[in-house]
Every structure is written in structure tokens, then in C-alpha cells.
Image: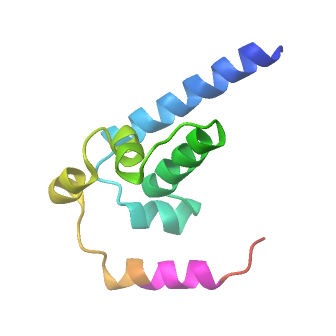
Amino acid sequence: MDDATRIELEAATFRRLVAHLRERTDVQNIDLMNLAGFCRNCLSKWYRAAAEERGLGLDDATAREIIYGMPYAEWKDRYQREASAEQQAAFVEAIRKPDA
């Protein structure tokens, strides 16, 4: 596979992941963090960092809007729920574990 095709496939896969996360508003960021070690906010930070590596200025709010499909504050108002005690405990436990 040539580099151009690989990059196209990676970009398509990323777009599919973002679209999936936009559709699955029932899945909370803390759930993603607890299960996968990353969340929508992580994706937005990685997106911003990639833009900066290429000399493109992109602030956190704009990067989050790209990932969430709407301003972050709006997403939080619509979909974010208070994390349960169990979710918070799982998060604390996950961040205490050394990297595998």
C-alpha cells in the first residue's frame, strides 16, 4: 500500500470514529476514559497538536467543536451527566495503574 492510500484510509477511519462518537452521546467521556484510556477531549487535544505541528493555529474550543460537532458547552448541557461514584472510582483506579 502506498503512503497516499494509507493516509486516505487513516483519515476515513478517523472521520468514522468521530461520527460514531457524535452519534453515541449516551457514552460519557468518563466511560471512554475508563475503558479505553482516551475520550473526546483527548481526541480534540491530539487534533490541535497535529495542527500546531503543521504550523496551523487552532485553539482548544475550535478543536473540541470539530470533534463534538457543536460547541463543547452545548454538548455538555445536552448530554453530559454527573459521573457516578462507581465511574469516578474506576477512573481513579485506572490512572493509578502503571502503563502496560
Residue 49 falls left or right of residue 2 = left
Residue 77 falls left or right of residue 3 = left
Residue 85 falls left or right of residue 34 = left
Q: Start and end of the magenta stretch?
A: 89-96
Q: Is residue 50 above or below residue 39?
A: above
Q: Position of residue 46 (x, y in %)?
A: 57, 49
Query: Residue 31's image quarter?
Result: bottom left
* Residue at horizontal 34 percent and vertical 85 percent from the top: 85
Report the front residue among 66 and 37: 66
Query: Residue 70's image quarter?
Result: top left
Report the front residue among 97 and 68: 68
Q: Position of residue 1 (x, y in %)?
A: 83, 15
* Residue at horizontal 38 percent and vertical 38 percent from the top: 66
* Residue at horizontal 50 percent and vertical 65 percent from the top: 33
Q: Main secondary structure of the magenta part?
A: helix
Residue 7 falls left or right of residue 60 = right
Quadrant housing the C terminus: bottom right
The total of numbered circles placed on residues is 0
What is the basis of the colouring in this image?
rainbow
Q: Position of residue 98 (x, y in %)?
A: 73, 80
Q: Position of residue 8 (x, y in %)?
A: 65, 18
Tell whether position 4 is magenta. Answer: no
* Residue at horizontal 58 percent and vertical 63 percent from the top: 37
Q: Is residue 40 above or below residue 19?
A: below
Report the front residue among 21 and 55: 55
